[in-house]
Image: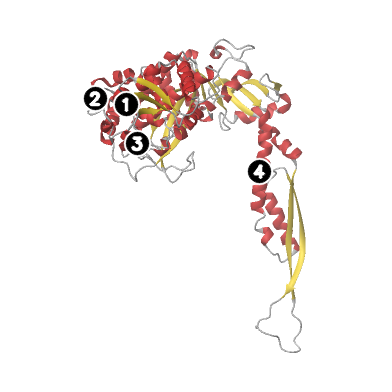
Amino acid sequence: MDFREKTYEGVGALSALTMAVFERCGLRDVIAEALGPAGAGRDLPVPSVVKMAVGAMTAPFDRIALSRFGEFYASAPVDMLFGEGLTKDSLNGTSVARALDVLYGAADLEELSWRCSEMCCEVYGLSSDIYHLDATNVPVYAVVEYLPDGGAPSAQFGGNSKTNRNDLRQYDAMAVADGNRVLRYLRTYSGNTGDAEMDADALEFLRTHIDTERSVCVADCKIVSKALVEGMCAMGLGFVSRCPEGFSEKVRETIVRSVGSSYLEESSLGEGYGTYDTDADTVCGPLRFIAYRTPKDREREVAYYREQGERLLSRAFSKPLRTEYHCREDAEAAAEAAAASVGDMGYRVRYAVSEGGRPVRRASRGRPPKGSPPPETETFWTLEVSWEFDEAAASALAEGEEIQVLVTNLPRANEDAGNIRFGATADTVVRTYLDEYKPEHVFRLLKSGIGMDKVYLHRGSRVAAMFFIAGVAGTLLSVMDEMLRRGNADMTTYRMRLGLHDTTVRVKRTTGYTYIDGHPGAGAEIESYCRIFGLEPELMLGM
């Protein structure tokens, strides 16, 4: 074994591609313009730090501490990627932290995130009049108490963690993704911020940044309140949302009762789909309601009854099955009470009471005296219980549960208008709502793809700045995903991350020769990505 290392200059392939898209979209200039003279930074140019963090976030690692950016780029041509005169030693934790402070203090991060996404969409020709809103919480590995940091958001213990990490402090975040799944807006909030506040802030931001008269907002049921619905209607913004049970004197219940599955018309969405389109008066004035059923709804409800019923019955009968009763009537009453506590879940419960007996133990130990009477027999009763799932009964129970109700202000139409804000069929409204998973895709990207849940910083302002950078990375990756779909590449950036983990883009400084080092076929694969993303290959290691 020859332990003398052979050095090279290069960077991971996906990081190189993402940073190249960053440069092609002109985000360096967008960030520099927003920061003004402060963007030059004390030690590092802030746009370069954003690019550097984006490259690190898209690498196949869980997280990288600020103090270890230099190690991550140890083999990279730092001056070519981030600026003339910079070296690996320039990328130290103190310099990066100072750049985050400048970024937070000198820029309106929500406005800048929008401008960055707007530039990406402009460069790649992506446009959409549909905006999906959703909020989430992001747990962070934080110190016990954050340092006082002015008005910066702070992490709080809040419970109800989306990742089941209630032991960690968490931030809240509001994201807006457009109809192309591109992350357009990301704002960080202190933990435990109410959804209504975040929804209201996002809607107010959109009011000043989009043509509300031509746009449609899609969100979950938390956006359906008197104040928010009236606000959207006042600004001319179309909306589609699931109707919550408590909205406007429980208008949803009235619609479900009046519809019934038999009234759902067959839908062009596919076999098993059904819709019912109606209007109703609400506290916000007349609105359009669409009840619908998907082929998976009944299956999902029946599966729920099967799994939940089994769980509840096992729990309800756990103690009665271990208990010995003094009389048959007590055993029967216990069985009836246990079954009633579960309710009707589509199960047929059968039980039987068995009589048993055993000798009563003598008061004294040892062998009884000669001539003692035989011991008395103690009688007791036990339960034997079995249950069987009745799919037909569960399907009947699911009849009403399977109906979902949407509320919208989109005009009714027999055929869709070119822009659904001016007219949409019931099927299109349902399809538009079912696309609400798009911001969930972004959150999944931020948490598991970029690792924001592993962030560890000592100042809330730096966390907010890092969330902004994560948003930039999320925008770039979502744009790349959309271009991959349009290029029929049968690939996603997540799969690229796995497939290119052993591939690097390298340069021989003496000759300027740039090449790919990796598995067989990696070069042709990266060449195809450059073509899909419209990249000059030299941009992967340049500015």
Q: CA distance from mark 3 to mark 2?
A: 26 Å
Looking at the image, which is closer to me, 445 or 159? 445
Q: Which amino acid type is marked by label 2?
A: Gly
Q: Is residue 508 left or right of residue 85?
A: right
Q: Which residue is mark 4?
A: 307
Looking at the image, which is closer to me, 16 or 371? 16
| Marks 1 & 3, CB-CB < 8 Å contact | no
Q: Which residue is mark 2?
A: 85
Quarter containing the N terminus = top left
Q: Which residue is mark 1?
A: 77
Question: In terms of secondary structure, where does tag 1 sit?
Answer: loop
Q: Nearer the viewer, mark 1 or mark 3?
A: 3
Q: CA distance from mark 4 to mark 2?
A: 63 Å
Q: Which amino acid type is marked by label 4?
A: Glu
Q: What label does residue 5 carry, if any?
A: 3
Q: CA distance from mark 1 to mark 3?
A: 18 Å
Percent across and percent down for residue 42 are 22, 28
| Marks 1 & 2, CB-CB < 8 Å contact | no
Tell me if residue 31 comes above or below residue 342 in the rendering. above
Q: Nearer the viewer, mark 4 or mark 2?
A: 2
User: How many other residues sit within 10 Å of disc 1, few (<14), some (14-19) or many (≥20)?
Assistant: many
Q: Nearer the viewer, mark 1 or mark 2?
A: 1
Q: CA distance from mark 1 to mark 4?
A: 56 Å
Percent across and percent down for residue 80 are 31, 22
First of labels 4, 3 by sequence position: 3
